[in-house]
Amino acid sequence: MAHRILVVDDETHILQVLSLKLRNNGFEVTTAVDGEDAMRQAIENPPDLMITDIQMPYMNGIELCNALLENNATNNIPVVVITARGHTLTASDTDIANVRDVISKPFSPRAVAELATSILANTPIQSSERSEAA
Amino acid sequence: MNTFSQNLSPSIASNNNVFAQLRSAGLVVVECTMMGKIEHEPIRGEDWFADLLLSSPIVRTAISTSCRTYLPDGRFAATEAIPGLWIVPTPISTDRRSTGYAVALIVTEELLASEYVHALCQASNAEVGVVRDMIRDLPPAAPQDIPRLSSLFQLAWNSHRSHSENKGVIEDIGRELTDSYEEINLLYTITGSMNSVNHPERFIELVCNELLKNMPYGWVGVQLRTGNRLPNPGNELISSGDSKHDSSQLSSIVAALTCDIAPGMPIIAHSGDHISQRLGDGTIVVPIENDGHVIGILISAEKQGTDTTVSSVDVKMLSATASQLGIFLENALLYEDLNATFLGTLEALTASIDAKDRYTCGHSQRVSLLTAQLAEAAGLPEAQVDRFRIAGLVHDIGKIGVPESVLLKKGKLTDEEYQAVQQHPEIGARILRDIPQMNDILGGVLHHHERYDGGGYPHGLAQEDIPLVARIIALADTFDAMSSSRTYRKAMTRTTVLDEMKRATQGQFDPALAEIFFRLDFSKWEELMIEDQSGQTNERLAA
């Protein structure tokens, strides 16, 4: 069984590229299109890692990180944040306890896969088996 | 359930779902070649109905015939092979080419009454009575449903096909998009470092490293042919990765390549040609151009893996990078030319002042060297070291305003003469102050005769009030002056000079800097000294 990663972005092409790259690197991947969607999925079926965009409708990436921390089921999920280059994050944004790393767009999909591999290298698989619906 | 073997080709395995769904609607489906040869069918022993139909030579022949006689005119294509068994072929295409047929077998209740049911049972060793009961239980289709079932089969099959094709297209787009992301990211990284024009070799190294991360090659390298216009890297090959050749072999192979290439004409090595023999199939050589001239080459060589065909992504990545390198190198060459002209002009100017007095010949250059060495040893950043080097070079520029009679006087100076000499830091600062680009080093010129204890000139500054650059030049200047034969003092050996300076450290110099200065490596300074002195000897001989 593989580590499962939840990729969150409102841009379809980014979801597509990251899913493909991460699957090719042996991960199981699920996707969400905004923070609310991601939060719902994370509670229902906590992933081993979340990779999320910042700018998203309904609930942005920072709000999502904070919401994850406030829920017992999701407060252990490590998060990688993707931000537009030139969009500076404040220290309070990146100091959120579960944010492991910040990546700037445009990013190298290979580098993201390497980062995911290194974050999950010594982590036992936590995520439950993917349900058919997920 | 109608199952297909797991070890079928992936495309068939992905068809499993649609096969199962069609089977539950009573249809047995097989896939045939263009010539009607059955290529994929349900495996035996898992579905009695499929076994019954497909064990019969009559049915198999009828399937083949239906494929071979299929007319793509859009008309209803079902044929009744034997009474009660209908065969419906529908064409399969892959990459816009017809590659075969999917054929559905549909049984109607007429089969029960047909004598062919005996033939079917015989072929699969089944009892007619049992088979009839099982067919009845299916239940079989009504004859009038055949056209509708056929159309539904064709519709289902075609939408299944277009669905999997679209999935394939989306995956292809995803893959291409992934490559584009890597390319965009590479160009971003490269563009972000293009401001380091004063260190072309570092930029080139970064480019090679980044490319190697993105391309399946053993090594990536850049060989310039800008001669000595860029002292670093000069004519050295810069590369990232490992080659099976040693570095001297590689240099000669690559040097030969730089002669082969023409503007706008990348070379891709093909099996057997001279480049592939040396650097492997799939090696790509791209010209780096400036103003229509080839100023170097970018190479990716020794392709990894078994597939040595060159992808368009590789070529695109390399070409895009080569054009960035072209722009960068144009700037680097301009910078280097300007910088060399600037430094050369300053050196000529200061050397001509030093040359008035044969005992100070080369003094400015040597002080410049020691200033830079001390600044570096004190841990200053490289950019600052470079500025201090210039400060060291021009520190005595004010001597141009001191009368030669005073500068060249042998023996002790009068008070007035000494005052005239002491003017030179201020004269120097006045000369340079209107050049904005010199503002950061003015302090070095104006204050290099200040003493750490406050007893120097022109302003009597003390300790940290003396600019750092001036405190550094003071050490370099004093050391060089004491070491040279001057009108007012005989040359002392280096050890004597250092001892003498150590004694003076009590008040004259910044003690922390002096400590570092005494431990400097003076070998380069010595080389310059010997050069300058032999120059003097030659001049004297010439005179």
Image (cartoon, rainbow, N blue to C red):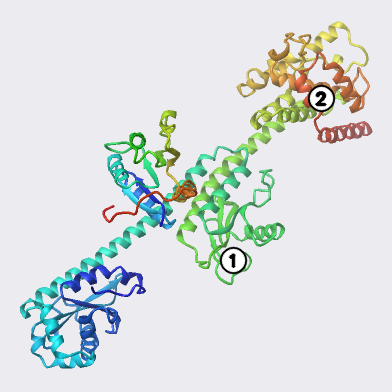
First reached walking from the N terminus: tag 1 or tag 2: 1
Residue type (three-letter) at the residue carrying disc 1: Gly
| B542, B531: nearer the viewer | B531
Q: Secondary structure at mark 1?
A: loop
* Label 1 chain ID: B
Q: Specify whether B522 is left or right of B302.
A: right
Number of numbered markers: 2
* Label 2 chain ID: B
Same chain letter for marks 1 and 2: yes
Q: Is residue B141 above or below residue B192?
A: below
**x and y percentages locating residue A32 in the rendered image:** 30, 46
**x and y percentages locating residue B156 in the rendered image:** 18, 68
Residue B396 visible (yes or no): no
Q: Specify whether B158 is left or right of B11.
A: left
Residue at the outermost left position: B144
Residue B22, quarter of picture: bottom left
Residue type (three-letter) at the residue carrying disc 2: Asp
| B358, A122: nearer the viewer | A122
The reply to whether discs 1 and 2 touch (Cβ–Cβ < 8 Å) is no
Q: Residues within 10 Å of mark 2 (few under 14, many from 20)?
A: many
**x and y percentages locating residue B418 in the rendered image:** 84, 10
Q: Secondary structure at mark 2?
A: helix
Q: Which residue is mark 2?
A: B354
Q: Which mark is residue B135?
A: none
Q: Is residue B220 above or below residue B435?
A: below
User: Of discs 1 and 2, which sits in the foreground?
Assistant: 1
Q: Specify whether B419 is left or right of A18.
A: right
| B524, B144: nearer the viewer | B144
Q: Which residue is mark 1?
A: B280
Q: Residue at x 63, y 57 (%)?
A: B242
